Every structure is written in C-alpha cells, then in structure tokens.
Amino acid sequence: MIEFQHVTKKYAGGIVAVDDVSFKIAKGEFVALVGPSGAGKSTLIKMLTREESPTSGRILVADRDIFQLRERELPYYRRKVGVIFQDFKLLSKKTVYENVAFALEVAGVLPKVIKKRVNEMLTLVGLENRANALSEALSGGEKQRVSIARALIHEPKLLIADEPTGNLDPVNSWEIVELLFKINKQGTIVLLATHDKEIVDAIHKRVISMKDGKIVDDRENGKYLL
Amino acid sequence: MKTNDSLTNFLITAARIIKMSAISFWRNRWLSLTTTLIIILTLLIISVFTFLSLIINKTASSMREKVDLEVYLKDSDSEDQVAALSELISSRPEVTGIKYITKDDALEKWRTKYATDQSLQNIITETDNPLPRSLQVKTKNPEDIGLVAEFLQNEDYAPLIAKLSYQQNKDMIDRLVKITSFVKKVGSGLSVLFLIISIMVVYNAIKLTIFARSEELEIMRLVGATDAYVRMPFVLEGIIYGLLAAIVSSLGLIISFKFLNPMVARYLSDIGYDVSAFMSSALYQVVGIQFLVALFLGIFCSFWATRQHLRKDF
C-alpha cells in the first residue's frame, strides 16, 4: 500500500534529513515510527503528505508515485490521507461539530450528508455529547479526538499521527492510542510517529526506528530502542 | 465520500465561498473601508481627468472643424472675378470646401446673430447693406489655412480681397491643444500613480486577511480543500472592494455631473456642439471605465496576493 524506495531528502546547506530510506507498509498495518528529535520522522511524514518533496527516490501510495500527482489532484490525495498533529490544528472559535464539518464543506458535500457523517465520526471518537462545545473550551484529549474525527471524515486509507500524544497527560495519551487501535481495526493504516517510549513498548506493534535520517531497526512487536 | 458535480453541489460551494468573503470583509471592516476609499479616490482621479480630456478634446476638434478662412471681398469685384477666385482656391489640394456668401447671405447671418437686438438688426437693410461678400474656405488641417492665406497675398489676387480673417480662432485652438496635452500628461501621471497606490493597498489588505486567517487556510488545505476553494473568497473580497468603490464613485460622479452639466453647457454654449449630450454620453463611458478599472484592481490584486500563499504547500 505504501512504499518508500531509496528516499533521500537533503536541505539547503547540505543537511541530510532522510538518507536512503526504503520500507513498505501493507494494508491494515499499525506502525510506530520512533526516534529522537532530528532523526527525520517529521521530514518523512511531510514527504508522505506531499508538503516536502524528496531529493531522490520515490514514494508510492496505492501503487502510484505521489510526486507524479498533478497540482489539482493534490487536494483529493490529501482527503485520502488523514493527518493529526501534536498541536491539533483546530479552529478555536468554532464548535466541535463545525470543526469536523469544515473538512466536508471544503469538499463541496451537501449539508444533509455532512450532518450524518459528522455525527457518525463524533460518535466514533466519543464526543457525540460535546458537538456544540467551542473547541477552545475542550481538554487536550478531547481536542485530539476532534482532530481525529476530522482526519477520518473523508474515510482515508491512511492515518498519520505526528506526535499525537505530545501535549497530553498519560491518561489522555492512552485514550488516544486506544482510539487509534480502534480505527486501525476498521482497516485504516495507522502510522504513529512518537518518541513516547512507554507507549511504544506497551503496544507490541511493528516499530520502525530512525536515527540521523536512516532506518536503524524495523521489526514486528518492537521496542523503543534508542 | 459521495461527490457529484450537480448544480446543487456547485451552488452550495458558491454560497459557502460568498459567505466566507462577506464575513471576512465585515470582520476587517476598517481595513475594508480604507481599502475601498483608496480605490474610490483612484477612480475619481481617473474619471475627472478622463472627463476633462474628453471634453477639451471634443471642444478643440469641434473648433478645429469650424476653423476656416474667411476671404472678404471688395464690393468692386465682379461676380466673374469672384467665381474665378473661388475656382482657383478650390483647386488647391489642401482645400476641402469653399462656400460663397452673398450679401443677402451675410445679412441673413447678421439677423440671426442679433435676433434679440432689434436696434442692431435695423441698422442694416436690404437696400443699404454694407456687409461684404465673402468666401468661406475649409481646409483639411487648420495649419493649411496659413498656406492658403499666403497664397492669396500674392499680388495677382490681393487687390480683390478686402480682408483675410483666420488668426483669432487659430490662437484659441493652439491654446486648447496645449491644454489638452497638459491635462493628458498630468491626468495619466496622477492616474498611474494612484493606480499603483491602489494596487499596493488592495494587495496588502488581502495579504493581511490571508495572514489573519492563515491558521484556517492551513487547515483548509490540510483537509483537502482545492486551491480554487481557498482562493475564491479572497478574489471575491477583492471584487467586493472594487465594486463598492465603483458604485460609490460613480454615484459621486453622477451627482456632481447633475450639478455641473448645466453650468458647463452654458459656459461652452458657443462651441457649436451639443455639450450637454456629449457630456452625458461621456459620463456613461467614464462610469464604464470606473467599473472596469475597479474590477481589474480587485481581481488582479487578489490573484497576486493568493498566488504566493498557494505556492507553498500547506
């Protein structure tokens, strides 16, 4: 489903952020991407969402080189790749419902379809009773759940979670991880980038470890090595 | 996800975009107001100078049409001599027309001119008519009049001629031509200057709204909004600035026109064309120009301002 082929990313000034990285992720997998800051996790994720382009190598998603996508195809690609962030990226003056509905509005979806889909998603993340709360009034864990609901609204095949628990306390963090498991069970690939050792060691999933832009370890039922 | 390209879908997207631009315009109303005012100022400057140069141009050209050489004949000339002279003048290449004014014609003109002044009218009668006969010579260009006049000063014809009259109008036209080119220079200079100012102001206003909404825009692109969807509210905002400005300045122009038109028409009544009608048609042209310039400003600036933003991937 996802394949990195000898992907290298060099920035101006000779910094090599990602160095000849190759790996595959199959349908339905749950993968933790770990490593210290500066290991290249973020650059790797940014290439997968096409915010950055590689200096060399290819990235295939569903057998398509995503850097061959035309500019106007890009929005449709991004709808198929859900992303959540450490800082949630919610619209603080909008309600929970509006934040999630927003993703469908920009896609030109009809109001009655939006209502149904948003309610389904809010139920999935357990926020059906908080629909009308302003997002700035939510706790960190709730905010991340809203952002998950939004990331899933287009039914993506891939959910990228970039340090989703970085701003959360342990209890909230585990709730989010549980939610990611639940989503994964429904068939969505989850790529969890984190440096939370406790979580990585406890989940018994495939772990890809990065250091200095290279993959140093990639194993099923992995541990946080570095 | 269900996507269909039906009309409803399009209308819903359009409605969402319009709503977004209206909200943005209102949220930044002081900025919007200032921007609109600058465009209004620019439009008014362009309009006033366009108007002025249109009117002066028209006046000059209508005077130019009227310029002719009046060759006053001596009463002692015979009709044959006059006919020969007329023949001679009209054979010159620069002459486009010649008209013989008899004593009766001259009297008729006199009477029309002083129709309201009985005492002046009665000074001259058919039996006692001191008004000379004349030849009205039209030339292709006003400058050619000098040539014809020079030619007539030749000793062969000079004895037949009482007086040549042309100098006065020519001076007037020269002056008008100078004024026109001056007005055009100042007008286009100022217009360009203010156009540049407007472009910068509108550009910056839209940049500011983009900046204020950068978080929202980032999220829009993140969740897969198309470039057009991200861009359209800003383009619409630019169009709103332009349209509002064009409406206000057109109203201003039309209202001041209603006041000024009678005055100007009276002042220029001697010119020999229907000043009022000309100004009315010019007014619509100028209003049209205003709307075009305003729309251009709004659309150009918003495309330019959003272009940079859309370039960088979200």
Image (tube, coloured by chain):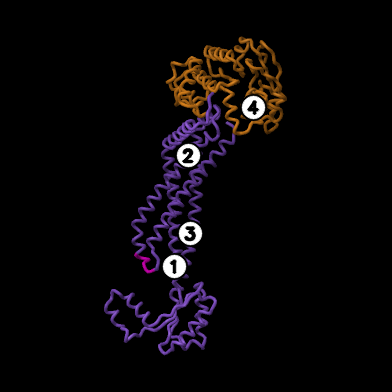
Q: Is residue A135 visible?
A: no
Q: Which residue is mark 1?
A: B62
Residue A47, numbered circle: 4
Q: Nearer the viewer, mark 3 or mark 4?
A: 4
Mark 3, other Cα within 10 Å: few <14 / some 14–19 / many ≥20: few
Q: Which mark is residue B236?
A: 2
Most foreground residue, A151 or A154 = A154
Give the magenta-colored segment's residue range.
Answer: B266-270
Numbered mark located on residue A142 in the image: none
Task: Give the label, 4 or 1, closer to the camera.
Answer: 1
x and y percentages locating residue B194 in the rendered image: 48, 51
Q: Please determine if labels 1 and 3 lie on a single subunit.
A: yes
Local crowd size for mark 2, using a 10 Å CA cut-off: few (<14), some (14–19), many (≥20) = many
Q: Closer to the N terminus: mark 1 or mark 3?
A: 1
- Mark 1 belongs to which subunit? B
Chain in orange, by letter, is A
Return the disc, 2 or 3, that comes first in the chain's sequence.
3
